[in-house]
Every structure is written in C-alpha cells, then in structure tokens.
Image (cartoon, helix red, strand yellow):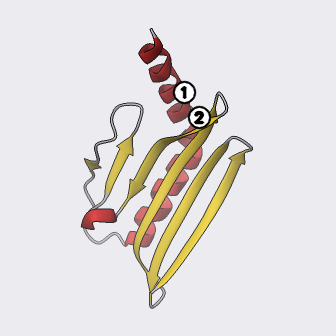
Amino acid sequence: MGVKDYPIMLTNEDIIDVKLKTEKNKVIGFAINLRCKIDDAWYAIYRIDTAHGYLHEQRFWISPEPIKLPTITGMSLKNIFDFYLKHLRKSWRRYKKYYEERMKLRCL
C-alpha cells in the first residue's frame, strides 16, 4: 500500500492537505482537509475522507460530527476523490467565510 501526503497551497494562510492511499495503482482511501490561518491561529475548516470505512465530511463551522455521504454506484474512489478536491478548490473561500462568521457569533 502506498500513501501520498501533500499540501496544496491556496495562499500563505489557506492550505488543502491531501492524503491519498493507493494499492496496485488504485485509490483505496483518502482525506482532504482545508485548514486556514485566522487571527494568527490555524483552524480546521472542512474535511472529507473515507476514514472509518465510509465517505463522510465534516463542516467545522457547524459541528465536528461527521456527515455520511452517499457514494455513487460504479463511481471509482479516484473519481470521487477528484470530484471533491475540485469542489473544495472552488469553494474554499466560502467555507472559510462560514467559519469566520461562526467564530464572530461565538464571541457575541
């Protein structure tokens, strides 16, 4: 089994961390994490992964609890990984904004 860990630098303060597990050139698991620096501290903003044996996401501006996601029959884990990585690359600013807004509400 091979494991690749690598960051995708969006800005100096916004990073997508990727962990991709493969076996015989086939994706068997992954984790995609968005972390952002806000007020000089790093926060986990969003995560989607296959840990615990199922596909789920965590929207940390709502709750740290995992939200189970459906898988599409016949769609490879590689295609699911590619879909969610592309989605996060497009949506990360919105997710960071949600997190920052939630932080402000907690301070009131």
Disc 2 marks a residue whose amino acid type is: Arg
Tag shown at residue 85: none
Tag shown at residue 97: 1
Position in image of residue 19 (x %, y %):
51, 67
Question: What residue is at 50 percent from the left and 43 percent from the top?
Answer: 44
Q: Quadrant of the N terminus?
A: bottom left
- The image quarter containing residue 78 is bottom left
Disc 1 marks a residue whose amino acid type is: Lys
Residue in the foreground of this view, choosing between 95 and 3: 3
Question: What residue is at 69 percent from the left and 40 percent from the top?
Answer: 13
- From the viewer's perspective, is residue 80 above or below residue 91? below
- From the viewer's perspective, is residue 78 above or below residue 14? below
- Work out how far the residue at label 1 is from the one at label 2, CA to CA, in angstroms: 6 Å
Confirm or deny contact between disc 1 and disc 2 (CB under 8 A).
Answer: yes
Q: Which residue is mark 2?
A: 93
Tally of numbered tags: 2
What SS does tag 1 mark?
Answer: helix
- From the viewer's perspective, is residue 58 above or below residue 84? above
- Please state if 30 lies on the left or on the right of 40 as rendered: left
- Please state if 99 lies on the left or on the right of 48 as rendered: right
